[in-house]
Image (cartoon, grey):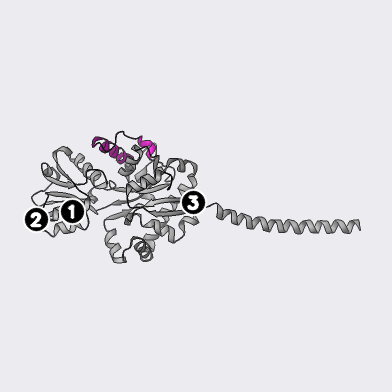
Amino acid sequence: MRKFGSIVLVVFLLIMTGCSGETKTEAQKEGAADKLTSFSLGVATWVGYAPLYIAEEKGFFKKNGIDVDLMTMESNTDRRTALAAKRIQGFASTVDTHVVSAASNVPVVQVVALDESYGGDGIVAKKEIKSLQDLKGKRVAVQTDGGASFFWFLYLLKQEGIDFKDIHAQNMTAGDAGAAFVANKVDAAVTWEPWLSKAKQTDFGSVLATSDISPGVITSTIGMRRDFVEENPEAVKALVKSWFEAVEYYKTNEEDALKIMGKAMGQSTEELKGSLKGVRFYDEEKNKEYFGTKEQPGKLHELTQLGSEFWKEQKLIEKEPNIDDLINYSAIQ
């Protein structure tokens, strides 16, 4: 009887061990799902950010272990305020915008480049104006209180050795600047489509320059809270990986990708194709080139530094932030 009891006990323990194993497996499955790191990103309705919606729709975020809430926030100021208040953990904007955030004591660090304007922005001018040098003394409509258009314009002037003070700048948004030029109220304007095309249709205007002459200058990146990046390095790597996968999906499944992005942007496929003509997405290879390494920084470091210098000179910021604190290379390498 004692032998029989021992056998029964062994069988019982084996059964319980098996059951326990099954229960543990289920718990592990549930635990894996719970391990998704959740965070929010602020994004504007801009085609350069559209692949983020591919990553969401095709499940790239969740496959890589993150749950990302893409929050539509059109204003840079709103996104910056939300980041400072920890209502979001990151937001997409141009490099110069992140400089302003850092100078405002918002702990932001750039982790991945998304896209660049490649012909979508430009300078329109009267036909007698043949070069940037000819803009001296002319009335130029440009948004002088910050923004990518102004940063790009300052960059071009610096390349030509032109002092911004030699330009009779008229402070207008890019859209208003284009409209003012077409109405023949200024000599030139820093603007974007559709005003570039509309300027060419006038009998007095032409396109003096477009952003494809300066690759990488008007570039959008995702800036995230530094504390979040330090505490969640794997989640940041997952975000970057998801972006790369989304860009590759666009390359290899263009028709489906355009439908997804068009829906997110509120555009038809044809409208979106037109919008994308002036934009280039940054894939993994382009990011590695743009970021470089901490030891050998790429163009991102140079432009972040320039943005800091430009905005300080224009008195848009009071102090220049530490540029090295504004770039995190770990998720790209």
**Residue at coordinates 30% horizontally, 62% vertically from top-left?**
272
Mark 2 belongs to which amino acid? Phe
Give residue 313's position: percent from left, percent from top.
Answer: 24, 35
The label number, if any, that marks residue 204 in the structure image: 2
Please report the bounds of the magenta region as a residue range: 301-330
Left or right side of 316 for 188: left
Q: Is residue 211 visible?
A: yes
Instruction: Tell me the quarter of the picture where residue 327 sits.
Output: top left
Which SS class for mark 1?
Answer: helix
Q: Nearer the viewer, residue 134 or 316?
A: 316
Q: Secondary structure at mark 2?
A: loop
Which-is-in-front pick, marks 3 and 2? Answer: 3
Q: Which residue is mark 3?
A: 38
Residue visible at 26% across and 56% down? 278
Q: Secondary structure at mark 3?
A: strand
Considering only order in the chain, which callout, 2 or 3, is on the residue closer to the N terminus? 3
The image shows a total of numbered marks equal to 3
Instruction: Identify the mark nearer the N-term, 3 or 1.
Output: 3
The x, y position of residue 87, in whole percent, is 43, 47
When the figure is inspected, residue 101 is found, relative to residue 252, above or below; the finding is above
Residue 16 colored magenta? Answer: no
Tell whether label 2 touches label 1 (CB within 8 Å).
no
What amino acid does circle 1 point to? Gly
- Mark 1 to mark 2 CA distance (whole Å): 14 Å
Residue at x 78%, y 56% (from the top left corner): 13
Looking at the picture, which amino acid does disc 3 mark? Ser
**Residue underneath mark 1:** 178
Q: Residues within 10 Å of mark 1 (few under 14, many from 20)?
A: many
